[in-house]
Image: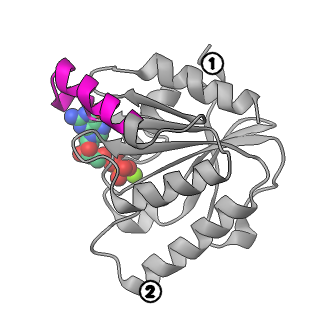
Amino acid sequence: MALLLSNATFLTSAAEIHQLPSDIGREVAFAGRSNAGKSTAINCLTQHKQLARASKTPGRTQLINFFTLDETHRLVDLPGYGFAKVPKQIKERWQTTMTQYLESRQSLSGLVLLMDIRHPLKPEDMTLLNWAQSSHLNTLILLTKADKLSRNQQAQTVAAVKRDALSLHTTVMAFSATAGIGVIEAQKTILSFLETK
Ligand SMILES: Nc1nc2c(ncn2[C@@H]2O[C@H](COP(=O)(O)OP(=O)(O)O)[C@@H](O)[C@H]2O)c(=O)[nH]1
Ligand SMILES: [Mg+2]
């Protein structure tokens, strides 16, 4: 079932739109604020320890990173947003590249939006979510670090985010890489995005 995901190998990094790999087949992109747990989630979902470096160095995370699953399927690690220490000019350049990627990429068949379950739906998350909804893009919201909350608190936050992010194309789940919460469900949803468009 998760075999395709565990095939993931690093393909390439792109800083500018002209460096993107061929726009063929299907890919699912991961987005979220810096520190939301994106690298940890990618490693967990692909069952690799070091695929996406769980790094806090902004230099490593400002590129769009592509991972090959097979000839026609890829995962994409988008630059984390909301990183306070990055100069405005660099932030604006990331935003331009990311916006160009999101708006032009034909093979993009799904978006995984990661948010710390304790701090969901920040303004940048809402911007991305609204764009995804207006583009009819399949979206999976992973509320990360769910192990930090009780089961009851997790369920309450999932319900609140479902209410605020209400859309036919959005799935919301609690997720924890460390406690193994939502991993199999998230893998299934991502595989379904890779199979449909
Ligand atoms: N408790 C807990 N901590 C996590 C989890 N996922 C990530 N973290 C921690 O959150 C911090 C940021 O994670 P990282 O994957 O580098 O976030 P990124 O900036 O979004 O790629 C790190 O200290 C991780 O160890 C999780 O499921 N549970
Ligand atoms: Mg990261």
Q: Which residue is mark 1?
A: 3
Q: Kindly identify the residue that appears in the image at 34 percent across and 20 percent down.
A: 181
Q: Main secondary structure of the magenta part?
A: helix
Q: Is residue 80 visible?
A: no
Q: Quadrant of ligand 1?
A: top left
Residue 147: within the magenta? yes
> In the image shown, does 50 or 83 lie closer to the viewer?
83
State the image coordinates of residue 45 (x, y, percent, origin top left). Answer: 48, 28
Where is 117 relative to 88, above or below?
above
Residue 89: which disc?
A: 2
Tell me the amino acid under the disc marked 1.
Leu
Location of the C terminus (image quadrant): top right
Tell me the amino acid under the disc marked 2.
Gln
| Residue sitting farthest toward the top | 1
Q: Kindly identify the residue that appears in the image at 24 percent across and 27 percent down.
A: 156
Q: Is residue 123 left or right of residue 117?
A: right
Where is 185 relative to 158, above or below?
above
What element does badge 1 sit on?
A: helix
Residue 2: within the magenta? no
> In the image shown, does 194 or 20 lie closer to the viewer?
194
Q: Look at the numbered disc 2 and say if its residue's Cβ is closer than 8 Å to ligand 1.
A: no
Q: Kindly identify the residue that appears in the image at 84 percent across and 47 percent down.
A: 24
Residue 159: which disc?
A: none
Q: Kindly identify the residue that appears in the image at 80 percent across and 37 percent down.
A: 72
CA gap between label 2 and label 1 equals 40 Å
State the image coordinates of residue 43 (x, y, percent, origin top left). Answer: 45, 35
The residue carrying pointer 2 sits among few (fewer than 14), some (14 to 19) or many (20 or more) residues within 10 Å by Cα, namely few
> In the image shown, does 193 or 48 lie closer to the viewer?
193
Q: Magenta residues?
A: 145-162
Location of the N terminus (image quadrant): top right
